[in-house]
Each structure stands twice: as C-alpha cells, then as structure tokens.
Image (tube, helix red, strand yellow):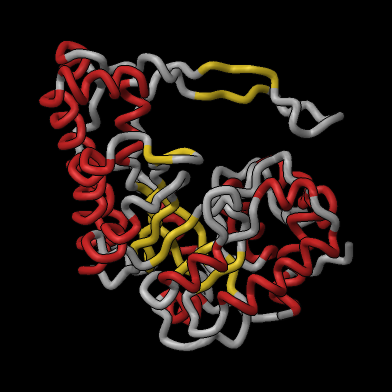
Amino acid sequence: MDFKPFTDIHPLDFEALLKNLRRLETPKRVFFMELFQDRAIEDAIDRTYKVTARLDPYRPEYELQRSIAMQRFLGYEYVGVSLLSLPTGAPHKAVDTAMEGQNQGERGWIDESRGPIASWEDFEKFPWPDGKTWDTRNLKWLEKNLPDDMCLVARGGHFCEYLCWLMGYETLCYALHDQRDLVQALADRILKLEESAAKALLESGRVRMFWASDDMGFKTGLMIAPDDMRHFVLRSHKYLAEIAHTADAPYLLHACGKRSDIVEDLIRDVKLDAIHSWEDTIEQITDAKRRYGKRLSLLGGIDVDFLCRSSEEEIRKRVRETVAVCQPGGGFCLGTGNTVANYIPMDNYLAMLDEGRKL
C-alpha cells in the first residue's frame, strides 16, 4: 500500500480535534484516536515506511521522539503521557505467537486468582507511592519539544482495573462480601494516587485531554455488580472528571465490556465526554450513535475481529458506512474497537486509516 505521511495530506490540528470531541459541529475531516498501537505493529510500519530513519536510537529521548514521529505519520494529534503505575505482581506468561515468523517474545496476563493485596497485612506492606513526588522528566521534555500542532493526552483512571489487578479478580469477588472495608480502603488509596497524578499532569499547558483506561466488564456483563461498580469505581471517575473539567480538559474513557447497566451513569453522573472500546457482539458504534451520540462522543468503532478477518475492500466499505452514521454533528473519531493489537494485519489497519483520510 502506498501510505504517505498524514501531514502530506492534511495538517494536524488538535484544537479542531477538541472542538470535534465537544460536538460543536460536524468536522471538515475525519479525526483518528487510538488508545495505543502495539509496538510490533509500529515496528512493522517503521520497517516499511522508514518513519524513524532520521532519529538516533542511542539518544536518551529516542522513545519520545519515536512516539511523536509515529503519531504524526499515522495522523494522530496527540501523544499520551502518564505518571502513576502500581506494581500488580508477576503475570502469567506464554510465548507470543501473534506474528508468525517474527520473534515477539512473551505475552503476559494478570493472575486472576490472587494479587499482591489479599489482606490488611498485604495492604499495609504494599509499596505505595507517596502520592506527592512524580517522575515528570518525560512530561517536561514533551512540553518543550512537542510540535505546536499536537497536544498531550494525560493517561490514568485505572480504578476497576487496579482493584482486579491488586487483589486478583477472584479475591476481589470474595472480598466484596467478606472484606468490604478492605475493598473500600483500596479504592480510596487508588483514588488518592490517581487524583494526585492527574493534577500534576493537568498543570501542564500542553495537556489538553484526560483519557482514563479502565476495563469494567466482559462480553455479557460487568466485572462486579452495577451498584458496587457505582460505589467503588464510578464515583472515582466522577471525581477525576471534575478535576479534568476544571482544567478545561475533556474526560475520555476506554472501558471494555458490556456497559449497558451503567451507560446512563457515565453520561449523567460521571459527565463523561467520550467513550471508547467497541465489540460487535456487544454493541456497534453506529447503534450507540443513534442511541446516545448527541450526549456522548464516540471513539473507534471498527471491531478488532472484523479488522483481522476482513478484506481490504470490506474494511474500506465499513469505514465509509461508519463515518456516514457517526460523523454528522461531530463527536466521532475513527479507530479500532479496542487497540491496534499485534495480530491485526498491518495493511488492514492502514487501510482503515487510509479510507478515513479520503473521507
């Protein structure tokens, strides 16, 4: 595929992206947003199109330069930046066979039975950050070196995920019945740390959005009961959204799973600005646009399984159909239904973007 740098076709314009997310009008072009692209996909693009050919891989800021170069090449107006990362224990590992013929190392996943915190003793011994000092070196470098037509997107908001990861999902389920005070203490500590990190990020004038990432469910329901989700998770997102809105930053949420039991809570109570993660077997983004697209912006929408299995023409046709429904009135950004996983064929991913460029 003859895939040119995005800026050879359209200028980047993060202010127009923000206007689109606020649903102020139908944008003049299709905008793109993606939670992240797997490194293996980026490396494949780099090998094919020489995106980072002029960068020195031995410079300490190489990874940040590389991120900027890749985002600009693909057509994204932003680079993500985060501060908080809690240790969640040793994951299970297996050989990653996603990309045949290439050594991709291992794929890891969290222990679903037990995490590092299963008791009050574990809670007290856990190496919690002090919540006052953060390593802002990447943030400071990006503030000085990010091109003027791009912005920074703050990352965080892992409330449900940290409960599942730190306790282990099975332990969390039992604790919701047997040790609710421990679950409450854990939720409170996570919120305190997320709040501190968010405020530190939003102090930067280059940070213009906050994108929380917090998987809350699976194909047929939520990870925990709706009322527990509201109490232990959504109230924390509401608080973080208030902090973002005070800084005039839209609050975006990536949340996998069936969200129908809490979608009105996300809109009315959390006051979410945009939502991401779509799976055709749960809800198609075009249906969501018709149901609540005037109240909530929608990101992504091209199902990952569809991207993996479909032909280029089928992908282009679906992009056209999705844009036709979701673009009017603003509040839509094209992307995958989840992330650009390393098992999505590179050409299929680029075909999705290319068709969006043409529109």
Residue 93 makes an appearance in the image = yes
| Residue 193 in sight from this viewpoint | no
Which residue ends up furthest to the left in the rendered image? 181
Residue at 36 percent across and 14 percent down: it is 114
Q: Quadrant of residue 141?
A: bottom left
Quadrant the N terminus occupies? bottom right
Q: If the image is split into quadrants, where does the C terminus sit?
A: bottom right
Please state if 217 lies on the left or on the right of 100 as rendered: left
Q: Give the image quarter of residue 108.
A: top right
Residue 198 at what x, y percent from top left?
27, 52
Residue 48: image location, x then y, percent: 85, 52
Q: Is residue 232 above or below residue 35?
A: above
Q: Residue at x 25, y 68 (%)?
A: 245
Location of residue 79 with respect to 61 vertically, above or below: below
Residue located 82% across and 30% down the image: 102
Of residues 26 and 47, the one nearer the viewer is: 26
* Image side of residue 248 versus residue 6, left or right: left
Image position, residue 220 (x, y; %)? 47, 40
Compared with 206, 134 (above or below) is above
x 26%, y 18%: residue: 174
Residue 257 in the image: state x and y as whole percent. 46, 44
Using the image as rendered, state which of residue 97 and residue 217 is in the foreground: 217
